[in-house]
Amino acid sequence: MARHLITSAIPYINGIKHLGNLVGSQLPADLFARYQRGRGHEVLFLCATDEHGTPAELAAAKAGKPVPEYCAEMHQVQARIAEGFGLSFDHFGRSSSPENHRLTQHFAAKLYENGLIREVSETQMYSRADGRFLPDRYIEGTCPNCGFESARGDQCDNCTKQLDPVDLINPHSTISGSTDLEMRETKHLYLCQSQMKDELEAWIDSKTDWPVLTTSIAKKWLNDGDGLQDRGITRDLDWGIPVKRGDKDWPGMEGKVFYVWFDAPIEYIACAQEWVNAGKGGDWARWWRTDAGAGDVTYTQFMGKDNVPFHTLSFPATILGSGEPWKLVDYIKSFNYLNYDGGQFSTSRGRGVFMDQALEILPADYWRWWLLSHAPESSDAEFTWENFQASVNKDLADVLGNFVSRVTKFCRSKFGEVVPEGGAWGAQEKSVIDELTTRIRAYEGHMEAMEVRKSAGELRAIWVAGNEYLQEAAPWATFKEDPARAAAQIRFALNLIPLYAALSAPFIPFTARTMLEAMTLDADWPGDIAQALERMPAGHGFAVPDNLFAKIADDSREDWQQRFAGTRD
Ligand SMILES: Nc1ncnc2c1ncn2[C@@H]1O[C@H](COP(=O)(O)OP(=O)(O)OP(=O)(O)O)[C@@H](O)[C@H]1O
Ligand SMILES: [Zn+2]
């Protein structure tokens, strides 16, 4: 039995996530976790909310709530929606947890001891009206690069250039609107990533099997311009993890917190501690410390492309720089972007379909199937309602749903709700077994390689094979001349249902469960396919399930198209 540690990029706290966020991180991570569990391996699958930083403070202010209260509420909301989508986290933690506070301060102490954190005096924008410094999104002004008028202190949303607040033309505070700003001297900590460039580059170069998207982004950050830069890891904010060296104060850093991108990935480790402290697991160290049993763990991370630099460079710099035996990631699966109907999904502008809305209109498996079978792997992908409707109706309703419905209903009408006796597998069945054997082994290969679209394509072909068999065998015709032969055909087709359920569970777990319950069986990953198709012998009882999928009608599609054309408030 192998051991898999799996983490999804942790969703930011400032609102409900959209379908792009889902398919770029949590959903493919869940697919992989469910697959590895299905194969009988030991899995620890972790996710959490990412709760620090200026957008959280601003969102809380907009909601008229204290930040801790806002974050606690949003965490609950996200946890509930994740459950609705069947995201099978072993624990859904919080980056604001006491565990993460301690661990982040611990890493800072180690990095400092190892000469990898330096203190820098710099000038920063200070707002006299607000009585505070204005980091990142607390300041807006005109972009010096493109002239966009609402560029933020850390980035221009129009031309995407990374900015420093001091670069902005006509800057103003987003808290009070005040333009009464001045440059003031302040001290910050920098993580000396540049010192670790060679070590990081050698490590990245050793990952020859990683997606090109992952390594190319890492290489760009390592080598573009002046090469890998040191990063400021502290901020003048109220909400966050106080800057300390372990449990000791850090002279000169009073009132400052760590930058969100320093503490967020450390939450992957802290989350395992939260999992233990919540009474769900016995030992976090055997997943995370190579000196405590994590040597045989395979660690895989899932994320969208904008998160790649932090996971390929900054977090590994933290881990390696600590000099302690923490587990490093083995594989980083990254995704391009999913776009929405001719534009981008956007949380701040409320554009697209959000996870709560999706569940209001259709069951989770419809979304899971479409999103995963259209995952933005080799390039950006686009959600359109036409494509969604076509693929749900064709793949789910016409192929899988129809197969299960035809087989079970025909059996009930001719033989009752019990697997019929008589006849034996012939050439037709053997050829289906051969085809399925080839396809299932290919499916396993794609799933192991985390090739999400290819896996979906193979799974669809496996479903199609059942439909084609039924079409050719035509038990409704056979039954008239040779009832024993028809019984064998139906027995064969019925046995495909639990096989399909086991294979499909990573993609559509709710439907897979319905299929297994109807067949009164547990999921069992098929080894030898001929044997797997003997699991329900003659006499085994089953129930005809309700239709697994309803087709999406044109007028529903049009309604939704209208409803989601604008922006959500
Ligand atoms: N359109 C998209 N398609 C695929 N993945 C995405 C998309 N937008 C964001 N992601 C990924 O979703 C995950 C969670 O994102 P996060 O909660 O941090 O929001 P975000 O990156 O600020 O995006 P947004 O501002 O659109 O909400 C990250 O791994 C991110 O890379
Ligand atoms: Zn710009």
Image (cartoon, grey):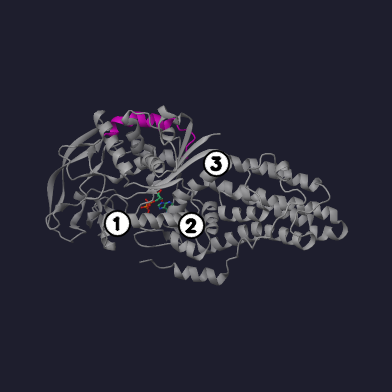
Q: Is the residue indicated by label 1 positioned so its CB lies within 8 Å of ligand 1?
A: no
Q: Where does label 2 land, which residue?
A: 84
The CA distance from mark 1 to mark 3 is: 36 Å
The CA distance from mark 2 to mark 3 is: 21 Å
Q: Where does label 1 land, which residue?
A: 69
Residue 526 percent location from the top left of the image: 66, 42
Whether residue 148 is visible here, answered yes or no, is no
Number of numbered discs on residues = 3
Residues under numbered marks 2 and 3 in contact, where contact means CB atoms less than 8 Å apart: no
The CA distance from mark 1 to mark 2 is: 23 Å
Above or below: residue 344 compared with residue 268: below
Q: Quadrant of residue 481?
A: bottom right
- Disc 1 crowd rating (10 Å Cα; few below 14, some 14-19, many 20+) is few
Above or below: residue 170 compared with residue 427: below
Q: Residue 30: which disc?
A: none
Q: Where does label 3 land, which residue?
A: 36
Residue 164 lies within the magenta run:
no
